[in-house]
Amino acid sequence: ASWMIVISFEIVILFFIDYSIDYIITINFFLISANLLGMFSSYFYELTLRMNFYHKNLLEVEKRKVERINFELEDRILRRTKELEKITNKAIESDKLKSMFLANISHEIRTPMNGILGFTTLLNNEELSPEKRKSYLEIISGRGEYLMEILNNLIEISMIESNSLQVKYEDIDLNVILTNLYKFLNEFFREKEITFVTDLPKLNENLIVRTDLVKLEQIITNLVTNASKYSSEGEVCLGYKINNKYLSIFVSDNGPGIPEHFRPYVFKSFVKNENMQEKFKQGAGLGLAISKGLAEIMGAKISYKSTVGEGTTFFLDFDKSVIVR
């Protein structure tokens, strides 16, 4: 636009106005100089505006980056804080569990030890009849076996928690194993008003499964003895079911059931339902914890259904792929 004005001015001066050449050169010098100064001024002004715009946008981009980094940092701090809270809560819970462990195990060990020491002292009485002496020795032997059971359970639960147990897979006939266990475990029910039965849908067939025999027998034994311990009448049933996904071995009873408030602690170590009658409180509270740990090592899942006043059923679920034939 400036140069068009200069050209228009030159045309007017050259063709329509009669001025001397010196005057025209002077006027042109100042006009062109002013035009050049204006152009450079406009250019630098435009350059300044563009630089300001660029730096403003750059500042906005950096500002958004800083905001994003701050947000991510706050989110990271929040997640770290939650993780620290979880770790702290676990540490507190672990400390409580240790205290509970010491309290329970000292009680469980002290009780049979007191019995052993007490009846050992009574055996020193030379006037004891042979019948009394034999009775005391049987009590000492029973308390010693109970104490050994507690120690064995302690060793086993520690091995489970430290992942020291190995799984030894082998092909077994489940019907044969459960039938033999039934015959062996039936001894627990002879002096009780409880019927021990089996529910084996394929009893007359070979049901070959691949699993760890020792651990399977231990889990079933724990579940059956637990059922016999917490039942006073009715029946305890050992059996299995096969569906599209699982081979489910179960142990059911007609006992008092598990109260709602106690259910979160069923598989915890050294936890017993203190609302049960005194005759139901035997044991250190390790059987179900051990069973759960063994099941997980074998790749199985242990669960239960319980109705207060009607009974409880525990399930040991294996993936159906364990069935060989």
Image (tube, rainbow, N blue to C red):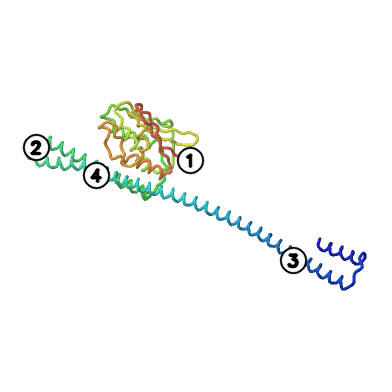
Asked if the residues shown at circle 3 and circle 4 are in contact, with their CB atoms under 8 angstroms apart, the answer is no
Please tell me whether mark 3 or mark 4 is closer to you in this view.
Answer: 3
Question: Is any atom of residue 44 visible in this view?
Answer: yes
Mark 4 and mark 2: Cα distance apart in space: 32 Å
Q: Nearer the viewer, residue 83 or 185?
A: 83
In primary-sequence order, the first of circles 1 and 3 is: 3
Q: How many residues crowd mark 3 within 10 Å: few (<14), some (14–19), many (20+)?
A: few
Mark 3 and mark 4: Cα distance apart in space: 96 Å
Looking at the rendering, in which quadrant would you find the N terminus? bottom right
Q: Nearer the viewer, residue 59 or 207?
A: 59
- Which of the 4 image quarters holds residue 45? bottom right
- Which of the 4 image quarters holds residue 114? top left
Residue in the picture at 36% in, 41% down: 291
The reply, left or right, for residue 108 in relation to residue 134 is right
Callout 4: SS: helix
Q: How many residues crowd mark 4 within 10 Å: few (<14), some (14–19), many (20+)?
A: few
Q: Position of residue 237 (x, y in %)?
A: 36, 30
The reply, left or right, for residue 169 in relation to residue 136 is right
Residue under label 3, please give it: 40
Asked if the residues shown at circle 1 and circle 3 are in contact, with their CB atoms under 8 angstroms apart, the answer is no
Residue under label 2, please give it: 128
Residue type pointed to by label 4: Ser
Q: Position of residue 159 (x, y in %)?
A: 34, 49
Asked if the residues shown at circle 1 and circle 2 are in contact, with their CB atoms under 8 angstroms apart, the answer is no
Asked if the residues shown at circle 4 and circle 1 are in contact, with their CB atoms under 8 angstroms apart, the answer is no
In this rendering, the answer to whether 63 lies above or below 270 is: below
Please tell me whether mark 4 or mark 1 is closer to you in this view.
Answer: 4
Residue 321's tag is 1
In primary-sequence order, the first of circles 4 and 1 is: 4
In primary-sequence order, the first of circles 3 and 4 is: 3
In primary-sequence order, the first of circles 4 and 2 is: 4
